Structure formats: C-alpha cells, structure tokens
Amino acid sequence: MSYHFLGLVRTLTKIIVYTLIGMAVVAGIIFAIFDVWTVPSDDPQLSVSVEPTLSSGDVVLVLRSTGAGDGAVVRCTDPQAEGRYVVGRAMGASGDDIEVSGAGLRLNGKTPSAPYACEVSKVTLRNPANDEDTELTCFVEEFAGGTHQSLRGKAVEREAKTKVEPGKVYLVSDNRVMHLDSRDFGTVAPSSCQRIAFRLWGSTGYLDTHKRLTAIW
C-alpha cells in the first residue's frame, strides 16, 4: 500500500471525524434551544383544530423558552388536562377585546385582513362534533406583520366575545369552525406556552401531501 494512498485515507478519516463532531455540536445546540415534539393524533378535535397550519402526527421543533408573542402558533399546557397540551395562535393579550366565530375574528373592533384565498381554497374535514364532512374555505390572513392560513365556514354557535384579563393570552385555532381554543378552555398564561417554530417532518394533512422542513408562522 503506497504512502500516497495511506495519506488519502488519513485525510478522508479526519474529514469524516470533523464532520461528525460538527454535526454533533450543531445537534447539541439545536436540542438545547428546541424540544422535538409530535402533534398528538389521539384527540380528533385537536387534530382538526390545528389545520391547515399543522396536522396531527407532524414532528415539530418547539422553543424551550416560554412566551406567546402576537400571532405565534404556540403549544401551551392544557388547563383542563394534566400532562397534555393545547395548540393555538396567540391572537389576544391583556386588555384586548376579542370576538371569534366560525366566520372570522375581530380584535379591538378590527378584523384582520384576509386579502386572498389559499392555493387550495376549499377544504373538507370531518367534524368530530357531529361526525359529518364539512366544507370550509381557506383564507390567507394578515396579522401582527405576518401571514397565515385560516379555515372559515358558517358559524354554528354564538359568537364568543371577551376582554382578555391581565397577564393572560387568548388562543384561537386556525380552524375557526372546528376549534379547540380559548372559546373552549379559556385564556392561558403566557408562561405556560412555547412557540412552535419549525416542522421537521409532516404527516399527510388536508392537502394529502407530506409537508417537511418548513417554518411555522
């Protein structure tokens, strides 16, 4: 075996070792900042409420730091079930007047702009409340300097109106009709919430496509 070949092997070995060390360092930093979490699939109401932004079974990165900024999708401690989480978009903070229904939302008397429909504008999901297929309309909504998708439809309940109490945050499901949000369990403390920042791997959602490696807004 020539010295040239041995030198090449040593060089390649060093490159592989240094690459693995670098990957381990990066992974360590990522896991120090984020928690890897899978959106539960054992609760039909939660599963439909997080559409279209998330789907049950999605593997996501959740910031370990706590807080619920305007418009962020957050995972919060379930105030009604120990050891479980609720997921929603932080849409109202201390002192805000908020009105929510299946048809939309008003914050301090103003309705967030929804200037255009989603690429797939009509979505059919099975409603766990009555076990019936329900057609919803998807809009791109502008809020807190960003955009996100929301599902709307005919309101089937009285509109919820409230003033957010001090030190609390109001969560709203992106699925405004088949919701699991503050209309159901009340407001939550921001200290119980962590932002869902990134999807590593996506399950098959309402578009019947796999979504992966995407930032969550």
Image: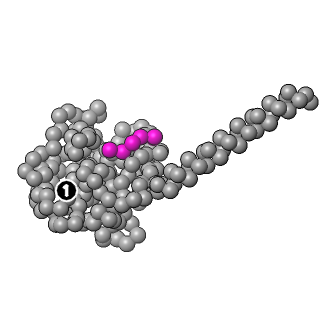
User: Which residue type carries mark 1?
Assistant: Gly
Please determine whether, in this image, residue 44 is positioned above or below residue 215: below
Residue 62 x/y as whole percent: 42, 54
Looking at the image, residue 217 lies above or below residue 94: above
Q: Quadrant of residue 206?
A: top left
The residue sitting at the left extreme is 109
x and y, in percent, of residue 91 in the image: 21, 53
SS of the residue under disc 1: strand
Total tally of numbered discs in the picture:
1
The residue at 82%/32% (across/down) is 7
As rendered, which of 58 and 62 lies closer to the eye?
62
In this orientation, which residue lies closer to the viewer: 120 or 85?
A: 85
Q: Nearer the viewer, residue 1 or 48?
A: 1
Residue 207, position as x, y percentages in the image: 36, 38
- Is residue 215 on the magenta stretch? yes
Q: Position of residue 63 (x, y in %)?
A: 41, 55
Q: Which residue is mark 1?
A: 92
User: In the rendered structure, does residue 9 fall within the stretch colored magenta?
Assistant: no
Determine whether, in the image, residue 207 is placed left or right of residue 182: right
Q: For residue 38, say whether it is visible.
A: no
